[in-house]
């Protein structure tokens, strides 16, 4: 009997809950709570219609720790799956500690008043989780999440060491809107307007946002411009792969997206500093998020594919002896996901799908005991094999190929 409590009712949660319902031998009892109960009910109705499974729904403000503790005590889940926003990570972890329940999320904590996402706030919970005999698994989405698992799979099966790593995230989908973000607009815009940071020779090097661009030919999508930016798995990858000389993250953006974002930034609409307007403090970015299309409404019109993967170069592994061969090799491992197929299956587009499926798989790893431990863990610390197997079985098949040599950019 594995009862889960999922918190948050956006696109990612919708996909994860649909996928959990498809795997009823692991997820025997699914409970869904969020700030707006109506959204939980809409997900529950879709799941019932598609799979016949009943989902119990609740209203909760996850930042109200005593109320959340009360809900967890009432439901008694084995695992709390946090698919709300990064701002809620710490209160939900606090509630898990108080109730002695395992925790999983897909994005690291970010304070509301500072556009800064780092693991140290959550890593600081390690000893308390360990002492309580419970587990927290951080970042079980696609990036972070699958990108870390891809890298560790290469390190287990193909490369003895990883010298250079590039993560390439391409959303080749077209939603037909002039400007919209494909996951929570506030979180998305905070991420892309932050300065770029990459790992080089033992430290993070900071460069202005969107200043470095490459052209890359993505299978299933075509040639796209990708921009170097900071992404949270660079922090955990550089910690758990100490030999890494360089690690970078690239994300594709179309010219229209860049044009709109530049204007919005220039006029101050992406600021998180409050502005006094008609007697009220308004945060421009939150107002902008309120007027932009809701990501969960884009599914129906989005066509095309996502292609996300990692390219790693290092000393090739001799699988027989487990030692290095002295020969350098480069491997590219990726997944291609169709927006239309994701929508057909779950009613959500591929960005939510590629995050919600790994959230379900990470949860399954914990509930079946394939991944276990006391304390706070990143994906890199776990055996990649059972997770990789489930990606193939549950809608995110991957492929790996050897490239001629290291990337030329
Ligand atoms: P949405 O904005 O669509 O959904 C967020 C949900 O959280 C909404 O239902 C919202 O409620 C709810 N929520 C917000 N605040 C609270 C609160 N205080 N208490 C309870 N519920 C709350 O986001 P997405 O589904 O797109 O993203 C979900 C998470 O996934 C985010 O943390 C995002 O950063 C992460 N993500 C991770 C990726 C990865 O690859 N690792 C990729 C994409 C996203 P309401 O409906 O009332 O607003």
Image (spheres, helix red, strand yellow):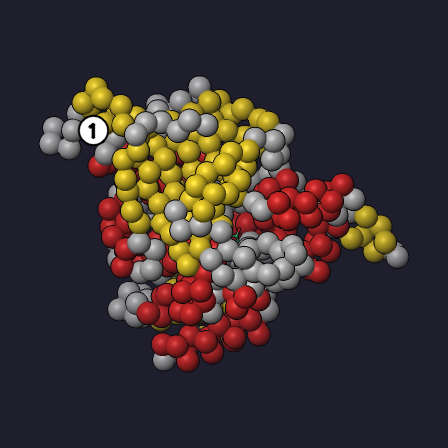
Q: Is residue 60 visible?
A: no
> Residue 16, how many percent across, how many down?
41, 62
> Residue 270, how many percent across, how many down?
71, 46
Q: Is residue 129 above or below residue 289?
A: above
Q: Is residue 9 left or right of residue 388?
A: right
Q: Is residue 216 left or right of residue 110?
A: left
Q: Residue at x 57, y 66 (%)?
A: 297
Q: Residue at x 27, y 35 (%)?
A: 402
Q: Residue at x 38, y 58 (%)?
A: 357
> Residue 217, how many percent across, how many down?
43, 41
Q: Is residue 309 visible?
A: yes
Please identify the residue farthest to the left as the structure is shown: 320
Q: Is residue 296 left or right of residue 379?
A: right
Q: Is residue 357 above or below residue 284?
A: below
Looking at the rendering, the quadrant in which ligand 1 lies is bottom right
Q: Nearer the viewer, residue 179 or 358?
A: 179
Q: Nearer the viewer, residue 372 or 399?
A: 399
Q: Which residue was labeled with disc 1?
A: 317
Does the residue tagged 1 have its C-beta within 8 Å of any atom of ligand 1? no
């Amino acid at each position: 009997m594995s009862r889960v409590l999922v918190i948050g009712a956006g696109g990612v949660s919708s996909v994860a809950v649909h996928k959990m319902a498809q795997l009823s031998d692991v997820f025997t009892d699914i409970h869904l709570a969020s700030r707006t109960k109506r959204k939980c009910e809409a997900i529950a109705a879709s799941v019932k219609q598609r799979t016949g499974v009943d989902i119990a729904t609740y209203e909760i403000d996850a930042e109200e720790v005593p109320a959340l503790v009360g809900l967890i005590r009432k439901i008694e889940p084995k695992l709390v799956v946090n698919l709300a926003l990064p701002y809620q990570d710490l209160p939900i972890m606090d509630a898990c500690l108080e109730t002695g329940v395992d925790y999983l999320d897909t994005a690291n904590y970010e304070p509301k008043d500072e556009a800064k996402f780092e693991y140290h706030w959550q890593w600081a919970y390690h000893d308390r989780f360990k002492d309580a005999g419970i587990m927290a698994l951080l970042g079980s989405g696609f990036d972070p999440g699958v990108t870390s698992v891809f890298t560790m799979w290469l390190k287990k099966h193909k490369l003895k060491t990883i010298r250079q790593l590039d993560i390439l995230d391409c959303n080749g989908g077209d939603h037909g809107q002039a400007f919209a973000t494909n996951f929570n607009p506030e979180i998305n815009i905070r991420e892309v307007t932050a300065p770029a940071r990459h790992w080089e020779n033992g430290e993070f090097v900071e460069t202005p946002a969107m200043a470095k661009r490459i052209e890359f030919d993505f299978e299933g999508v075509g040639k796209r411009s990708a921009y170097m930016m900071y992404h949270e798995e660079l922090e955990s990858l550089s910690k758990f792969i100490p030999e890494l000389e360089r690690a970078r993250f690239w994300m594709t953006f179309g010219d229209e997206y860049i044009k709109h974002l530049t204007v919005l930034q220039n006029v101050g609409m992406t600021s998180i500093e409050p502005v006094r307007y008609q007697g009220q403090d308004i945060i421009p970015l939150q107002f902008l998020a309120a007027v932009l299309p809701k990501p969960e409404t884009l599914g129906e019109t989005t066509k095309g594919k996502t292609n996300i993967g990692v390219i790693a170069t290092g000393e090739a592994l001799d699988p027989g002896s487990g030692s290095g061969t002295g020969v350098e090799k480069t491997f590219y491992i990726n997944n291609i996901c169709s927006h239309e197929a994701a929508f057909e299956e779950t009613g959500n587009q591929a960005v939510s799908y590629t995050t919600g499926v790994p959230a379900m798989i990470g949860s399954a790893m914990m509930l079946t005991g394939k991944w276990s431990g006391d304390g706070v863990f990143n994906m890199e610390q776990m055996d990649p094999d059972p997770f990789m197997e489930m990606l193939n079985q549950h809608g995110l098949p991957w492929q790996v190929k050897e490239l001629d040599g290291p990337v030329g950019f």
